[in-house]
Amino acid sequence: KMRPLFVLALLAGITAATGVPTLAWGTNIALPSEPSAMDRRLDRAYSFVRDGKAEEAISVLDELIYALESAHPLKAGIAYYSARSMNEAVAYSMLHTIKNDQDVYVTDRNWGESYFLKGFALIDAKRPREAIVWFDKAIALSPRNAHFLNERAEWYKMARDWDRAFAEF
């Protein structure tokens, strides 16, 4: 069911020059237009992974994940998502809210990508058994992210869990 204030709140959120756009039924969408300190930390972790410095990446990601989880404490009755764009944020919000009639909190890419990249770095650090937990967390926040789903499928393939790998692919 569509709440009547949705369209007005959505338009206000999209056109707002500053602040966090908020949808009428409690959905928060926080997608900054300029790189934040968290964006820079995530980019630094990606650089470490590219340079083959998995442990350094994990260290940066642990700090980032702590900061993100502190900034977004989980509350009962709210579904949390991490989106790469405003379109994806609105899609997560609408699909979940319409289906579940539950409040939704949607934030930028950093939260989901930090979980994903930690899983990826753990594999590079020769600690693959720890990685699946982080892929699962990333996909819980970004369930339509094909990159995250593909990497989890690769993990299942590596673990020779053919049924799950096939389902993910």
Image: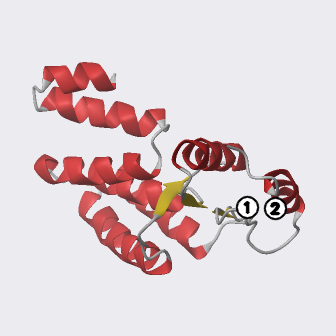
Position of residue 102 in the picture relative to residue 125 (left or right): right
Place residue 151 in its image quadrant.
Answer: top left
Q: Residues within 10 Å of mark 2 (few under 14, many from 20)?
A: many
- Give the numbered dot on residue 142: none
Q: Are marks 2 and 1 in contact (CB under 8 Å)?
A: yes
Q: Nearer the viewer, mark 2 or mark 1?
A: 1
Question: Could you say which quadrant of the image residue 66 lies in?
Answer: bottom left
Question: What residue lies at 81% left-to-right and 55% top-to-bottom?
Answer: 10
Near-viewer residue (136 or 1) = 1
Dot 2 falls on a residue whose secondary structure is helix
- The residue singled out by tag 2 in the image is 13
Q: Dividing the image into 4 quarters, which one contains the N terminus? A: top right
Q: Is residue 52 visible?
A: no
Q: Which mark is residue 23?
A: 1
Task: Identify the residue shown where x is 40% and y is 40%.
Answer: 148
Q: Name the residue located 84 percent from the left edge and 51 percent from the top edge.
A: 7
Residue 132 percent location from the top left of the image: 21, 47
Q: Quadrant of the C terminus?
A: top left
Q: Is residue 162 visible?
A: yes
Left or right placement of residue 110 versus residue 66 in this view: right
- Left/right of residue 168 with respect to residue 109 in the rendered view: left
Q: Please name the amino acid that badge 1 sits on.
A: Leu
